[in-house]
Image: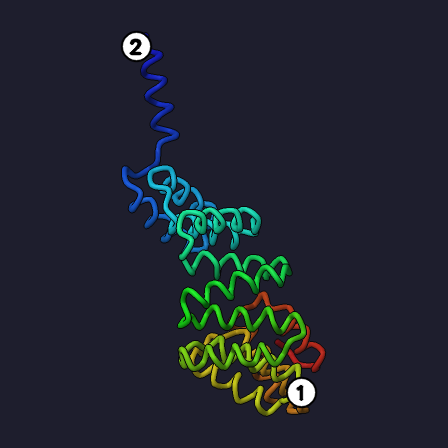
Amino acid sequence: MRFLMLVASLLVAVVAPAFADAASEYQAGQTAYDQNNYAEAIRHYSNAIKLKPDSRAYVARGNAYDDNGQIDLGIADYTTAIAISPKYPDAYSNRGVAYYRKKEYDRALGDLGKAIELKPDSAFSYVTRGNVYDDKGLPDQALADYSTAMQIDPKFYRSYGERGSAYGRLGRLDEAITDLTKGIELNPRYTFGYLIRAQIYEKKNDRDKAIADYRQALALDPARAVARQALQRLGVEP
């Protein structure tokens, strides 16, 4: 009997959360998430949810699932968070991002619109909705959302990068360069900004500036195959 009780105690120790309280588990999940250790983050968030199933923990675990490539599990967690807290804007905005990644654009627009209704000062939600509009072939609505995001938060570099990218696709190359340059000024490690600006410079036949930006994009993110291929196409070393 004593042996059976010992085994049972060991099993409880194995399956029980590592910390005694939900806040500590949640914080451990945040630390793991910030280190891109999504599996570990999911484990800690799951422990936090067992101890205290609140909407914040579900959204956090949803983010980890989403970034780990498990989009449907992420959507399920965001949906649970919304059921718990129907007025939680982050749950709608993050589920909108997940739907956008799945190319379910109408669902994404519905969620992002709700997030903006609940939190009208969210530059992130406006930029993301702008991306959805852009991918749906609605550039005017996209440009309007990017511009609104800039008014809300003039230092949110992604607003400039995304609007610059949209201008580039519309052939408004000088406006594109202005926006992309501003985005890079706000965040000198903005790989996307360098990459898109390089492509714009290439369209303008400004070879030297294009090469410089492709090289900078590759230096910031050596996995950017597009930048490497562009440099090879231009006949220069990365």
The picture places residue 19, in percent across and down from the top left corner, at 30, 39
Q: Residue furthest left?
A: 20
The picture places residue 107, in percent across and down from the top left corner, at 59, 59
- Residue occupying the point 51% across, 72% down: 127
Task: Report the front residue among 27 and 105.
Answer: 105
Which quarter of the figure has residue 151?
bottom left
> Is the residue marked by circle 1 packed among few (<14), some (14-19), or many (20+) residues within 10 Å?
few
Task: Report the front residue among 111 and 195.
Answer: 111
Q: Is residue 41 left or right of residue 224?
A: left
> Is the residue marked by circle 2 packed among few (<14), some (14-19), or many (20+) residues within 10 Å?
few
Q: Amino acid at mark 1?
A: Gly
Which quarter of the figure has residue 198?
bottom right
Q: Which residue position holds label 2?
A: 2
- Residue occupying the point 62% across, 87% down: 201
Disc number at residue 171? 1
Q: Amino acid at mark 2?
A: Arg
Task: Describe the element under mark 2 as helix, strand or loop.
Answer: helix
Mark 1 vs 2, N-terminal side: 2
Q: Is residue 138 visible?
A: yes
Q: Is residue 188 left or right of residue 219?
A: left
Spatial CA span between label 1 and label 2: 78 Å
45 up-or-down from 113: above or below = above
**Viewer-side label of 1, 2:** 1
